[in-house]
Image (tube, coloured by chain):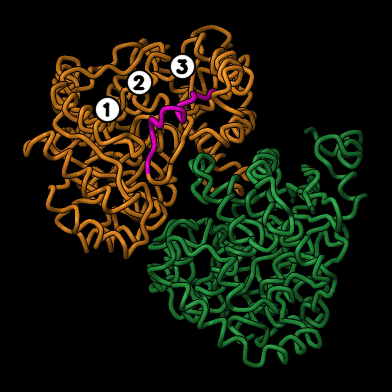
Chain colours: A orange, B green
Amino acid sequence: MSRITAARVTDIRFPTSIELDGSDAVNVDPNYSAAYIQLATSDGPDGFGLVFTGGRGNEVVAAALRSAVDLLPDSDLEAMLENLGDVSRRLVHDSQFRWIGPEKGATHMAAGAVLNALWDIKAKRAGLPLWELLARMTPEELVAVVDFSHLRDALTEREAFDILRRGEGGKEERIAELKANGYPAYTTSPGWLGYSDEKMVRLAREAVSEGYSLIKLKIAGSLDDDVRRLRLAREAVGPDVAIAVDANQNWEVHEAAPWMRELQPYDVHWVEEPTSPDDVLGHARIRREIAPIRVATGEAVQNRIIFKQLLQAEAIDVLQIDATRVAGPGENIAILLLAAKFGVPVCPHAGGVGLCELVQHFAFFDYAAVSCSQDGRVIEFVDHLHEHFHAPARVTGGRYQAQLAPGNGAEMRDESVETWAYPAGPGWQDLRARGLIDY
Amino acid sequence: MSRITAARVTDIRFPTSIELDGSDAVNVDPNYSAAYIQLATSDGPDGFGLVFTGGRGNEVVAAALRSAVDLLPDSDLEAMLENLGDVSRRLVHDSQFRWIGPEKGATHMAAGAVLNALWDIKAKRAGLPLWELLARMTPEELVAVVDFSHLRDALTEREAFDILRRGEGGKEERIAELKANGYPAYTTSPGWLGYSDEKMVRLAREAVSEGYSLIKLKIAGSLDDDVRRLRLAREAVGPDVAIAVDANQNWEVHEAAPWMRELQPYDVHWVEEPTSPDDVLGHARIRREIAPIRVATGEAVQNRIIFKQLLQAEAIDVLQIDATRVAGPGENIAILLLAAKFGVPVCPHAGGVGLCELVQHFAFFDYAAVSCSQDGRVIEFVDHLHEHFHAPARVTGGRYQAQLAPGNGAEMRDESVETWAYPAGPGWQDLRARGLIDY
């Protein structure tokens, strides 16, 4: 019998706050971090999952990971891998554990990482990258891994099945096309709020020369700064490159429209996270007030039930899934199906630690089997921290190249895990010894 | 200088699953638990706070409590107690910690417990029960402890101030009235889903004879059971006692109306948690479909931003605050002010461990200084586990008696903390030795 023999959880943090990589109006000084889980198995490849966080609190998610593992059934691993929908329901709806959510925050993210690790094992055993494993599952198999609870007023099993059955047509051609040409990317690398104007302009020009047709700037710290930076960026990239902006939840609902009117002359492709990710009605109001500027959100949306409402309320033009906030591939498939039902394009959130590596699989799967379209769709890319992964995301000519390595992409290099384990890893000890940090 | 000298966190659990106290359609076998925090001070009474949970996962909230304490400023305690609004913002909006929410789940509940413990110290230093401390604060002081972020499209500081200034009139009389007559209670003790019909009927009759004019039954496991139990309960209590029902999130949005139509003949006072607590639009639809049956929710609502939307969408008739899910007294005051602005009565959720002890303060404060009304308002009471508290909630003649002991009510008896510490406390060891549990 095949079994999970051990779960190893590590609190990994990178000292990104020193260079202000990743800084925005709300996340002013993140240390990009991962609560990282390795599931060892009795007879095959290990599985890996992670939760991205901003640093402090990563230890809480690590604790939640240990607790989520304890909820797994003590049963044959092969049987679990054949019934990942049941495993997901067991983790997400555990009759005691659920009180702490339900389906949100540290415990939900932890359940997601454990599920990601199980899917990693399943994909490695199949010898396929996760996106291709998903793309080659039948509509029946996919419907079985989705939790439709509290979705059925917007999306039934039958409707999901119909969407996926339509996606069967031409699937092989789309898989081949993805392997040949990849999937469009955009980049946030130039736009961090902590960067000087000069650095931002230089990086924006570099992004265009690297083949990106969409870049994103962080905004909503100061209106004057935003107008100046957007003017400089528009001058730097010219009229044909799209510029999205990201307010990172910093506005009250009524503040978004007047602020955005000042930025409209610079042709904004979308505005992301204009207010609290919990505020469905607020997003709907903002979208009405700033049309035709488009509204995007999702990286901090807690679960499929909020996404359902954002779609029902016509609150967003662009849906941004995140690989490590919801309950693993099953919940992300639910969200892709909802987006397809409502005809809203999915543009995944990435960056952080490992988010590019993980989330690309869902965009590739979406093109192969769900929306079957790349129109208006693009995966975020930030060129940070990829060197720590076994199979790093690769973007060339402004396109994600198809990941071909088996698994979900979460596996990190042993040396990185050891060096940046917090607080005792040698990387952190060295920073302390050099007086660069005091924590 | 006054300081916090130590923080002691304990994972306390009670073996309630053995008797199925607290069982409902979703929480089928809870072990009522508390992640409990004691803040020791250099020069005065200690402060106590807790987060109620259902058992498994309590250790995650305990970990989050330790991390939340680390976010407190290393400053004079008196200065902190004078600026609890600032302390709250520091805990809730920490630029790294917030990623794990924002403002939801384990980390948000933990921030709330730390804030509750600080308010406990403040109330004890003032020699007042928390409700009276709050009732005697000025409108300016109260506005300063509320976090209005992401609320201002529905409630501004100015509007809150006006509500509180109106509440100044007659406040002394209302405080005196609360001390003399208390506040109306209702009871869920008869209604747990795991109880036999006989036990339910007996307890319902007892509740009426004890003076309750409203009882609540758990439903949504099986329609046939619900119809039978509601018929038996209605026969037992007669036509003049109100019966509310609680579906504990178990329905899809479209399932609520047909189910409730079958129960309507038995005169349902409200239906609670018909669907996911995240589903604002779902609650609004259900309310329209089942009118005139009223909709109640709140015990699992993660923060003020969801409550804001429930009110904006006219999704609820009864707003149920919870003492240990949101970010302490400041966020509960925000929610009381929102409810007052929208004219919706607040009927607090209680039961669990310590929820009666803690939440009564907000209802008493609401009557003294915010809504200034008891019409249609009632605090839940469940007669469990009060013996573990220093100043237990007291209900006589169907009314909560005013708490007069200084503090917030969270302080537990040392012996209880020791006996039921999980997993090593002697209470748990004894249950294992007797073969009653295997965990």
Q: Is residue B203 positioned above or below B210 on the image? A: above
Q: Quick check: is A16 in the magenta stretch?
A: yes
Q: Which residues are magenta?
A: A12-24
Q: Amino acid at mark 3?
A: Ile
Report whether residue B199 is seen. Answer: no
Q: Are marks 3 and 1 on the same chain?
A: yes
Name the element at disc 2: helix
Q: Residues within 10 Å of mark 3 (few under 14, many from 20)?
A: many
Q: Which residue is mark 1?
A: A365
Q: Which disc number belongs to residue A121?
A: 3
* Position of residue A226 measured from the top left corner of the image (x, y, whole percent): 26, 48
Q: Are marks 1 and 2 on the same chain?
A: yes
Q: Quadrant of the C terminus of chain A?
A: top right
Q: Amino acid at mark 2?
A: Leu
In the rendered structure, the answer to whether residue A395 lies left or right of residue A352 reads left
* Chain under numbered label 2: A
Q: Which residue is mark 2?
A: A130
Give the alpha-carbon distance from disc 2 to disc 3, as whole Å.
10 Å
Q: Residue at x 87, y 35 (%)?
A: B432
Report whether residue B207 is seen. Answer: yes
Which label's residue is closer to the chain start, 1 or 2?
2
* Position of residue A130 measured from the top left corner of the image (x, y, whole percent): 35, 20
In the rendered structure, the answer to whether residue A332 lies left or right of residue B401 reads left
* Chain under numbered label 1: A
Q: How many marks?
A: 3
Name the element at disc 1: helix
Name the element at disc 3: helix
